[in-house]
Image (cartoon, rainbow, N blue to C red):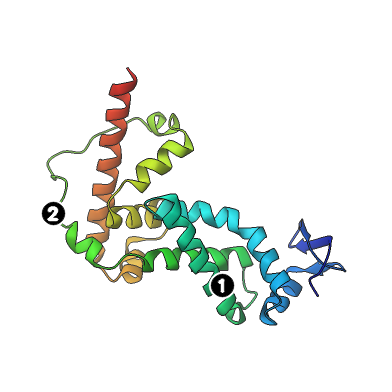
Amino acid sequence: MCQQTAICIEGKQLVQVNTDAYVTEQDLIKGCLRENQQCQAEVFRLYAGKMLGVCLRYARHRMEAEDILQDAFIRVFDNIAQFQFKGSLESWIRQIVVNTALKKYQQKSFRDEEIGIDEHYDLMLEPSIYADLHEEELLNLIAALPDGYRLVFNLYAIEGYSHGEIADMLGIEVGTSRSQLLKARRMLQEKIVEMQKIAV
């Protein structure tokens, strides 16, 4: 039972948990299955920070990211019985968070953005230019992308999905995924060039 102060062994990591005894991640999950609010609160405490970072990349602003996070954790607890212990709980939660973020945006995002940046050029920037950006600056640039561009950029460049997987997830054509990624990269490059001009 999750109650007050001890150590939870999560894989090889030791994490603080409110309980009377030593419990494992599996015990926390069992508590969540019983709808034990203290166990649910502990799971939220353990993973909410990381997952908010994921939400911030998909959302247009922090308030929207927090809404996505709340919706995602409601789904986590509603569907905790589907977790099969075949991977880490964190990865399973992350997948739900990403799916929740994607559901915030309809296929309309892609229809509206089919006409976008001209195809006649491609800016070439040194990789070090990206390295010079602070994390917050990069997050702000990504957040400013149109919805379709932002979703595909996150899924491909950060989450590591293939264009085929992205197409299936978003209900779009593979070519649309490739096009959205290209346009997202170009838009980011343009913004970075503008920032450099201002900084000079």
Residue 11 in sight in this render: yes
Residue 88 in sight in this render: no
Task: Tell me if mark 1 has few (under 14), some (14-19) or many (20+) residues whose alpha carbon lies within 10 angstroms of its own.
Answer: many
Circles 2, 1 touching at the beta carbon (< 8 Å): no
Mark 2 residue type: Ile
At x 41%, y 29%, the residue is 128
Does 29 sit above or below residue 18?
below
Of badges 2 and 1, nearer the viewer stands: 1
At x 78%, y 69%, the residue is 24
Q: Position of residue 89 (x, y in %)?
A: 63, 67
Is 166 on the left-hand or right-hand side of 82?
left
Mark 1 residue type: Val
Q: Most extreme residue toward the front, as rendered?
A: 63
The Cα atoms of the two marked residues, 2 and 1, are separated by 37 Å
Query: Which tag, 2 or 1, sits closer to the chain's start?
Result: 1
Rendering quarter of residue 110:
bottom left
Q: Quarter of the image containing the C terminus?
A: top left
Q: Nearer the viewer, residue 95 or 174?
A: 95
Question: Which residue is under mark 2?
Answer: 115
Q: Nearer the viewer, residue 193 or 61?
A: 61
Q: Position of residue 138 (x, y in %)?
A: 41, 39
At x 52%, y 55%, the residue is 52
Number of numbered labels in the structure image: 2
Mark number, residue 76:
1
Is 182 on the left-hand or right-hand side of 133?
left
At x 49%, y 57%, the residue is 66
Q: Quarter of the image containing the N terminus?
A: bottom right
